Image (tube, rainbow, N blue to C red):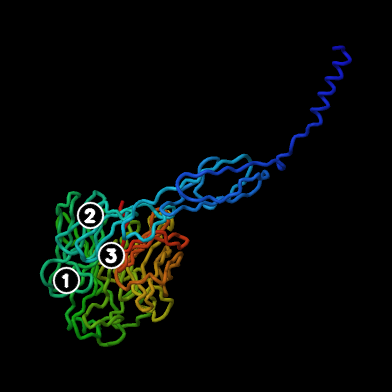
Amino acid sequence: MTASLYRISILSVFIIFSCTKEIPLEEQTFLLEVSQEGEGNVSYFSGPHLYGSSVDVSATAAAGFYFDRWEGSITSEDNPLNIQITAATRLRAVFLPIPELSPEVVLYTPKKMDDNNVLLIENGGRKAYVVDKTGTKLQSFSFPLNLGNDFELLPDGGYMGIFKPEGSLTFSFGGYGGVLQQYDVGGNLVWEYALHTEDELLHHDFEVLPNGNVLVLVWERIRTEEAKAAGVSLDVDVFPEKIIEIDPTTNTVVWQWRSWEHLVQDQYPDAANYGSIASNYTKIDVNYVNKDNGDIMHANALVYDVQRDLIYMSVNFYSEVWVIDHNTTTANAQSVAGDLLYRFGNPSAYAGEGDRLFDNNHHPNFVNSTFGLGNMLVYSNGTSTQQSVVYELALPNSFSASNGFVLPEVVWSYSHPDLYFNLISGAVRLPNGNTLICEGDYGYWEVTQEKEVVWKYDGGGQRFWRGYLAQ
């Protein structure tokens, strides 16, 4: 090849390459390829898609399966999934089979429900059991006595319950107990405390303190003559609430608080405790409830505040929660120091008016999950409206007040036309932020923060006492 021809060839190559233009990124197109594992259908448009295009991909599981996740170029559990196309994209929709469910599980949403096990307690019965979300019983407990009512798993693997004694009692009301029993992990009885006399009766609930002592509710009999002298309008023996603290190592009562020592009444000027109800909001209007059987308060739950050494007591007939100072001696608890530090749920019980929140109530408990940490859940039975409501409340930081109490703030609540029982029941916050609700005469609901029901357990007519997370 001559030099002139060589120069012409080089020039031609240069011209060809210099005329080839690179396609701008925003004008390039890419394909979307989707496959699947398991049974279901995927909806998408394969393309081509311009760079930066927004594409929606959705997965619908077939019967007996659920959508679990997307894999491939993108990993996600969102469904539908929105994708920004920036390159050729491959996805795989993974559908997994729904496990076999027990007949009691009538709603099962794997991707939204909390996967922790639940402790189910047959109210007043002789059984409790741990179930997983398929309804499979992983562990069962049987007792020689009927529960009356609370039963709890202990950190060491053992358990404790309040039980009904055998034989007849001098008096009793719904939720009565009489015997505290603790069992080890092997089901052996290791501790017992009984109190079911003519004048005192353990009932409903107990709370194990960090030092191993046990708080428990007690009904105590006040004879008619003493009751009338204290300004009670009823002509019967009455049974107000008492809290005792038991040292299990000695089986002795080491602390107590008596509601009877913190009363007010405005009906009988010549009787004790006379005064203005509204001006004595830290005291208890002894005539707020008039039950012919003398059960005038009917507390049903205890909660212990470890950080502040306080006791929260759910008082059903007052539709309130009372807060009591535990950081005091029994002697001081008899004085003004033992008056209510705080109360909430029903201002009409002390102020005569105000925004009422509870309509009978059960199971106050603190949220331990990061979702609402430190708030309190309370189940309002809704007796007058026949509509139960679960409230999540932010309590005030300080309980001191000069003219009444600051109401708690409702930060979340849940109700449903089908959610109602006027007795027992409760709710707890789960680790993933969902709320487990025990509807006492039905079973259990699990509800998301967005108020979507994602799991239901129908007990088939069995009544249940609360619902605890089984850890």
Residue type at the position of mark 1: Glu
Q: Tell me where residue 191 sits by quadrant.
A: bottom left
Q: Residue at x 43, y 70 (%)?
A: 407
Q: Residues within 10 Å of mark 1 (few under 14, many from 20)?
A: many
Which one is earlier in the sequence, the residue at label 3 or at label 2? 2
Q: Residue at x 87, y 12 (%)?
A: 2
Contact, CB < 8 Å: mark 3 with mark 2?
no
Return the mark for residue 464: 3
**Relative to 277, 178 lies left or right:** left
Figure check: 276 above or below 380: below
Residue type at the position of mark 2: Ser
Q: Residues within 10 Å of mark 3 (few under 14, many from 20)?
A: many
Q: Position of residue 61 (x, y in %)?
A: 47, 52
Q: Which residue is mark 2?
A: 140
- Per the model, the C-alpha gap separating discs 1 and 3 is 26 Å
Q: Which residue is mark 1?
A: 200
Q: Position of residue 152 (x, y in %)?
A: 25, 57
Q: Residue at x 50, y 44 (%)?
A: 36
